[in-house]
Image (tube, rainbow, N blue to C red):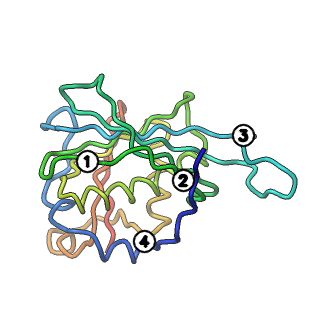
Amino acid sequence: MFIKRLKGMTIKAMTCCLSLTSLLTLPAMASDDVHKDWIVDVKTEEIKRQFDYRGSTLKTVAKLTVEFFHETDKDNVKPYQKIYYHDGKPIGMERTGDLNLPPTETVVIKVTPKRGTADSEENKGAADILWRLALSLSHNRSPLISTILPDASFNEISRELLRIGFSDSAAGPEKANKAKAMLALESETSGESKKVYFY
């Protein structure tokens, strides 16, 4: 399997590339209530022994697999990439396709654990990959209207986004307009929702 090292990229450096228009123009709404064209599916899983060898510090690794499909053609799933994480930091990537979505078509991201409930390593990786996907979608002018999280992971992923630089403080219209990025989070079934901002 081909894995290439990822160059370090800070949240602030990535933010400079973001377009406010694609991330801030649409309000947070329940994903069932709005029209969505594409689903970006992020599957998370823990890798227990793949990197466990003498001298390795990578005892626990999470693999996040990203695929996507059109809302009207759910059987035609297209691969995008696999990213490996340790302690919330990307340590390798395998690109399996291109995220070639038509510009201006709306997108929902859904995070799904492969084995029931995700562990902390998976949730930390999910927070990072949400930011990276938001960046890619912004470059493509694809509006990200919602991010659906597993009920059991909603709080931990939200906290991890705060840890890497986002804010969940109540922001009035004037302050919200100054945000460099906003992610609209919602739980899969429990009805929780939250907007997180990066200033």
Q: Is residue 144 above or below residue 25?
A: above
Residue that badge 2 annotates? 124
Select label 1 or label 4 by which is in front: 1
Residue kind at label 2, given as amino acid type: Lys
Name the residue type under label 1.
Asn
Q: Residue at x 48, y 57 (%)?
A: 159
Q: How many marks?
A: 4
Q: Residue furthest front?
A: 2
Q: Residue at x 55, y 32 (%)?
A: 117
**Kind of residue at disc 3:** Lys
Q: Can you say whether 27 is above or below 138 in the image?
A: above
Earlier residue among tags 3 and 1: 3
Q: List x then y, in percent, for residue 187.
A: 36, 39
The disc, 4 or 2, on the residue closer to the chain's N-terminal end is: 4
Sequence order check: which comes first, mark 4 or mark 3?
Answer: 4
Q: Are marks 2 and 3 in contact (CB under 8 Å)?
A: no
Quadrant (top left, top right, bottom left, bottom right) of the C terminus: bottom left
- Secondary structure of the residue carrying tag 1 is loop
Q: Which residue is mark 3?
A: 48
First reached walking from the N terminus: tag 2 or tag 3: 3
Q: Is residue 168 left or right of residue 95?
A: left
